[in-house]
């Protein structure tokens, strides 16, 4: 029996024209399932940013409908205030949404305007700044920050709202590689807390491995929406969108056509598992924040609480980003590895271990106490 997922955001035949007559969105109909991780892909000018601004009511459609929790978005002051308590948008350019002078003041602005107790506002600011690695910059003037740092402040301001839907428009643009991985780690953490996470990206490799749902937008129209495997199997859609096939997907198809594997992996390590036949995997050791005992092999960290612990205690870490994937690679090479992992992110690890298990290889995961 097919289980029908709840829909948190939906557009029905959505049309939008900018002043001057340009049709930016044309009959856009999309459904965003609750608790889903969604990647919108497509060329520049496809309408992704315009669509996102409809999701939280910045723009009002020319025609059609936008629903949140099965109710039409009301473009009244009260209606938009209620919507933006739940649906937050991080724009491409952080300077479009940062308007306070000091970092912590900007992050506190949203929660403060929800009339929360000051202790709760402080907690939200502390948590958000820790998640983006900016707690040490909280007193700095924003105009002294780099573009990437300002982008992290913008993300922190959105996180401080504890959104039910977090929308990030090209969130990795202008960030260094390590912060790109940190951002997806943050997205996983927000998602595991029950929020829906929506991004637009030109990084098709990440869209393939990270997203549950991929939507292709070109010239204001939806060309396809489905699982990463479904969408990236549509060669005609990719051609129209000017998109290439992710390397992982291409390897999946190659191995399938050559009879090497009929199981499709989401990441490079799972795609190449059949080349590791005969290797006896090591053990993956899990550690929670506070663990100070013996570690085995190289050590990774994943999750904001775990990061805070290892940084405060000067724990030596080899894998500071993309840690789950890199620890699994070590284990598949026959070595032991250890990872500090927030308990709320266990499901992210479980999903990757199940991908490996589907290829007939079981990785033993043991929690250290």
Image: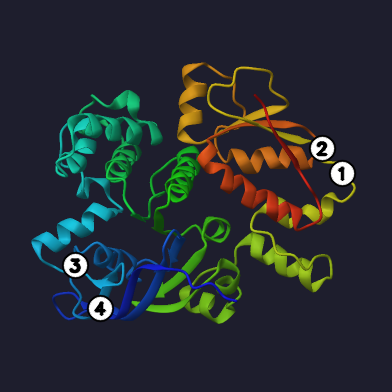
Q: Residue 223 in the image: state x and y as whole percent.
A: 45, 79
Q: Is residue 175 left or right of residue 230?
A: left
Residue topped by disc 4: 65
**In the rendered image, which quarter contains the N terminus?**
bottom right
Residue topped by disc 2: 334
Distance, label 1 to label 4, CA atoms, is 55 Å
Q: Which mark is residue 133?
A: none
Q: Residue 93 in the image: state x and y as whole percent.
A: 27, 50
Helix, strand or loop for disc 3: loop
Residue topped by disc 3: 59
Residue topped by disc 1: 279
Give the residue drawn at x 71%, y 50%. 269
Give the residue drawn at x 34%, y 72%. 10
Pick whichever of labels 4 and 2 is earlier in the sequence.
4
Q: Are marks 2 and 1 in contact (CB under 8 Å)?
A: yes
Query: Which mark's residue is nearer the viewer, 1 or 4?
Result: 4
Distance, label 4 to label 2, CA atoms, is 54 Å
Q: Compared with residue 221, is residue 324 higher up or lower down, i.e. above or below?
A: above
Residue 337 visible in rendering: yes
Q: Residue 31 in the image: state x and y as whole percent.
A: 40, 73
Residue 219 visible in rendering: no
- For this orientation, the residue located farthest to the right is 278
Which quadrant would residue 231 be assigned to in this image? bottom right
Which quadrant would residue 245 be assigned to in this image? bottom right
- Give whichever of 8, 48 is nearer the camera: 8
């Amino acid at each position: 029996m097919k289980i029908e997922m709840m829909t948190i955001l939906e557009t029905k035949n959505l049309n939008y024209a900018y002043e001057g007559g340009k049709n930016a969105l044309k009959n856009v109909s999309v459904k965003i399932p609750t608790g889903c991780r969604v990647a919108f892909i497509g060329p520049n000018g496809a309408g992704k940013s315009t669509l996102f601004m409809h999701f939280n009511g910045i723009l009002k459609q020319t025609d059609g409908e936008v629903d949140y929790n099965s109710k039409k978005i009301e473009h009244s002051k009260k209606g938009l205030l209620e919507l933006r308590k739940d649906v937050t948008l991080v724009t491409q350019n952080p300077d479009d949404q940062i308007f306070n002078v000091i970092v912590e003041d900007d992050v506190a602005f949203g929660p403060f305007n929800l009339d929360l107790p000051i202790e709760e506002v402080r907690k939200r600011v502390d948590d958000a700044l820790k998640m983006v690695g900016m707690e040490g910059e909280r007193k700095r003037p924003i105009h002294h920050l780099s573009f990437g740092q300002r982008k992290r402040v913008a993300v922190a301001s959105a996180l401080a709202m504890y959104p039910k839907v977090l929308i990030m428009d090209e969130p990795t643009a202008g960030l260094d590689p390590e912060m790109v991985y940190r951002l997806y780690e943050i997205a996983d953490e927000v998602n595991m807390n029950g929020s829906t996470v929506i991004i637009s990206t030109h990084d098709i490799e990440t869209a393939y491995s990270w997203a549950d749902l991929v939507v292709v937008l070109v010239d204001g129209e939806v060309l396809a929406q489905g699982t990463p495997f479904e969408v990236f199997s549509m060669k005609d859609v990719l051609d129209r969108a000017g998109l290439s096939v992710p390397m992982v997907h291409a390897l999946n198809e190659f191995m399938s056509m050559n009879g090497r594997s009929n199981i499709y992996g989401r990441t490079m390590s799972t795609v190449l598992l059949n080349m590791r036949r005969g290797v006896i995997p090591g053990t993956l050791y899990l550690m929670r924040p506070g663990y100070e005992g013996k570690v085995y092999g190289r050590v990774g960290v994943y999750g904001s609480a775990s990061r805070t612990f290892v940084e405060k205690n000067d724990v030596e870490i080899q894998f500071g980003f993309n840690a789950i994937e890199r620890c699994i690679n070590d284990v598949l090479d026959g070595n032991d590895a250890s990872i500090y992992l927030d308990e709320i992110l266990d499901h992210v690890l479980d999903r990757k271990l199940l991908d490996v298990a589907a290829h007939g290889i079981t990785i033993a995961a043991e929690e250290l106490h």
